[in-house]
Image (cartoon, helix red, strand yellow):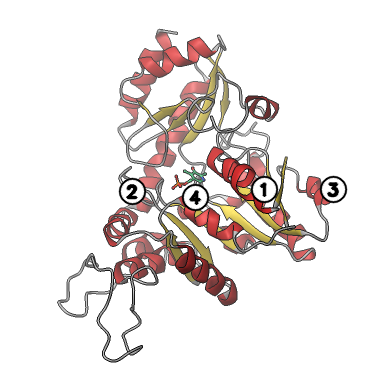
Amino acid sequence: MKFGTKAIHAGVEPDPTTGAIMTPIYQTSTYVQESPGKHKGYAYARGANPTRNALQKSIAALEDGKFGLCFSSGMGATDAVIKLLSPGDEVITSNDLYGGSYRMFKRVFEKFGIKFHFIDLTDSKNIHQYLNANTKLMWLETPSNPLMRIIDIAACCEVAKKHNIMVAVDNTFASPYLQNPLALGADIVMHSVTKYLGGHSDVIMGALIVNDEKLYSDLAFIANSCGAVPGPQDSFLVLRGIKTLHLRMERHCFNGTKVAEFLKNHAKVGKVYWPGFSDHPNHDIAKRQMRDFGGMISFTLKNDTVENAIKLMESVELFSLAESLGGVESLINHPASMTHASIPKEERIKNGLSDSLIRLSVGVEDIEDLLADLDNALAKV
Ligand SMILES: *Cc1c(COP(=O)(O)O)cnc(C)c1O
């Protein structure tokens, strides 16, 4: 099955009792058993729920994976992966990471004795000096947030395989429509389902997709033991959102390309960060491992001050000033004070994230309206 057909059909069967074409919302916490332990695979809804199961199958199919597991948030999914580790274990990850992942690694898990190395992974050769017998996991995020750097997933997986290290990829920015890390050698794909998969800015959810059965059962054990599972109503909303994922992504990519080119040619704009430009430092890898370049763009102004950047963010009308991304509506964001405020300033600046950087999540509105809105706002700065 091809992607669009899977988005509509994978994991979804007509309801066995009524024939309902849409998966019912099984709003129940528990299930009646025939005799103790004898049931239809459902005992208590922390462990399993039919609406959630349909969604897990759908998301697994989109990543060409065998097993999917959904969590109550993207951070809940990441938390489950780190809980596979033990005190003394070490993780190699990138220095240009979602702020919440950085915060969880540094402030929650370091105190349990897990060590994180935040390094430049755009060159896989950098990995070697941080490898040792305790290295257990590589955590990649590509395209990175918010600087749109691209990490070569296959090259990192090759190094990891040689040293028996597990690789997890946060695939939130690309969505399964643009990139499938399992096919490039990764062991775990993580999604903030909140973003492109849900697609309508109305649900918080996370997911993990794996091929290995033992890894799946270890993660399912953690999900059930620690309990960060999503409810049936949210599972239903995401099942509905996924049915248009391919259509939305096509438009996100089209609009993203137009907006990136518009900004690049605008006299008031400084640097534009978008992997689709042929002069982007990692453009070749992006072209190889992604099907298109997406609708996430960051940029600075030529008059590069924080005040000016804030003025622009206050001047746009169609682009809403908000955290998050991947919804049908266009958003504008100030990473330094919003999505990445949890990363210490000196750490941020060192990694190239300036206080004046502006990030866009380009939605699926009509492109003429989006460009007019940006043009009007740029005239005021
Ligand atoms: C939003 C986001 C997360 C966290 O997901 P939540 O659903 O907000 O918990 C992780 N990684 C990336 C890249 C994100 O954009």
Q: CA distance from mark 3 to mark 2?
A: 40 Å
Q: Which residue is mark 4?
A: 75
Query: Mark 4 falls on what kind of element?
Result: helix
Q: Amino acid at mark 2?
A: Val
Q: Indicate yes or no: mark 4 CB to ligand 1 under 8 Å.
A: yes
Query: Mark 2 falls on what kind of element?
Result: loop
Q: CA distance from mark 1 to mark 2?
A: 29 Å
How far from the left and from the top, in percent, is residue 227?
A: 43, 62
Query: Mark 1 falls on what kind of element?
Result: helix
Q: CA distance from mark 4 to mark 1?
A: 16 Å
Q: CA distance from mark 2 to mark 4?
A: 14 Å
Residue count near mark 4 (Cα–Cα under 10 Å), binned few <14, some 14–19, many ≥20: many
Q: Are marks 2 and 4 in contact (CB under 8 Å)?
A: no
Left or right, 123 with respect to 336, comes to right
The quadrant in which residue 5 appears is: bottom left
Q: Which residue is mark 2?
A: 203
Numbered label attached to residue 129: 3
Left or right, 115 with respect to 186, comes to right
Along the line of sight, which residue is nearer the eye, 373 or 233?
Answer: 233
Q: Amino acid at mark 3?
A: Gln
Q: Amino acid at mark 1?
A: Glu
The quadrant in which residue 166 appears is: bottom right
How far from the left and from the top, in percent, is residue 138?
A: 68, 54
Q: Quick one: label 4 or label 3, which is nearer the N terminus?
A: 4
Q: Quadrant of the C terminus?
A: top left
